[in-house]
Image (cartoon, rainbow, N blue to C red):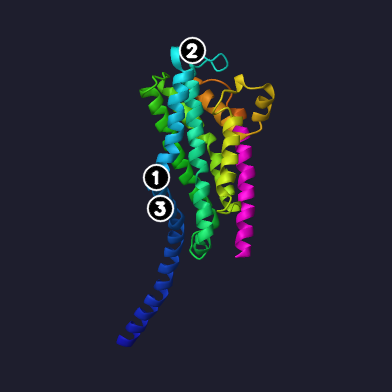
Amino acid sequence: MISTSAASNGETSHTQLPRRRRRGIPGALLSTPVRYLGLESARQLRNLRGLIFTFAVPLLMLLVFGSAYGSGGVIDRVTGLPWVVVTTIQMAGYGGMMAALGQAFNIVTERSLGWNRQLRLTPLTGAGYLLSKVVSALAVALVSIVLLIVVAVVVLGAKLSFLGWTMATLGLWIGVVPFALIAVLIGQFAKPSYAQPLFLIVFFGLAILGGLWIPLQIMPSWVSNVAQAVPSYWLNRLGQMGASVSGNALEPVLILLGWTIALAVLISWRYKRDAARS
């Protein structure tokens, strides 16, 4: 009886142990991307030097342009918004775009150090790695957008309803998504030797053509026509529509969605190509 009981207990422990392991594996795999996302976002937000540079430039431009264009309560005839609000939307979009695109340097550095190859040996999937980069870029972008709007309200006296500011913030944040993907794409293609020049060309081109620095109304008409082909233009438009709580947001949303899908396809192709090489 004792031996039978022992054998029975042995069988029970032998059959239950693999089941426990099988139940534990999916949870571990599921938690890996979430943990990495948390670590990546925390690392981005703890990088004080990077954050100061990311926030300082658009903040300075907001104070300069906001004082120049936004004084006297002048109303913009195109949007129907006070010029100080228009300038705030432009600079908040500029700051959010800059924060998102800055992720490119982190990816270039990690690729040069071989960090992405090391991650392929872990349970973290390629999609989880890329998604963590996009989400962490969006987290920093949101902080930048909110900070600039708060400064505009407190320092420049920009006035808008709570709903208007909320919708403007949401519109700008949604509009930043393609730029987070552009950052990932630059990070996948660029090498440390030319990452910064490539970043500056893309960044300045998008900022100028999108009307984030200078209102397109005062620029030649051909610039306005070209601007409608770049996502920064629609980022600005989405923020303006949110601020005025009016207009058909379907067009900018669909165009930005098209950019997002196209960039995601390119990123997936590039990642698979790099994985096949390694």
- Quadrant location of the C terminus? bottom right
Q: Earlier in the sequence, mark 1 or mark 3?
A: 3
What residue type is disc 1 on? Arg
**Labels 3, 2: front one:** 2
The answer to which of 90 and 39 lies nearer the viewer is 90
The answer to which of 33 and 99 lies nearer the viewer is 99
What residue type is disc 3 on? Leu
Residue 176 among magenta residues: no
In percent of width and height, residue 111 lies at 53, 57
Q: Is residue 156 visible?
A: yes
In percent of width and height, residue 151 lies at 38, 27
Identify the disc placed on residue 39. Answer: 3
Residue 255 among magenta residues: yes
Identify the disc placed on residue 74. Answer: 2
Identify the disc placed on residue 258. Answer: none
Q: Earlier in the sequence, mark 3 or mark 2?
A: 3
Label 1 to label 3, Cα distance in Å? 18 Å
Q: Which residues are magenta?
A: 253-278
User: Is residue 275 shown above or below 106?
Assistant: below
**Labels 1, 3: front one:** 1
What residue type is disc 2 on? Val
User: Is residue 27 shown above or below 167?
Assistant: below
Crowd around label 2: few <14 · some 14–19 · many ≥20 (10 Å): few
Give the SS element for disc 3: helix
Give the SS element for disc 1: helix
Residue picked out by circle 1: 49
Label 2 to label 1, Cα distance in Å? 36 Å
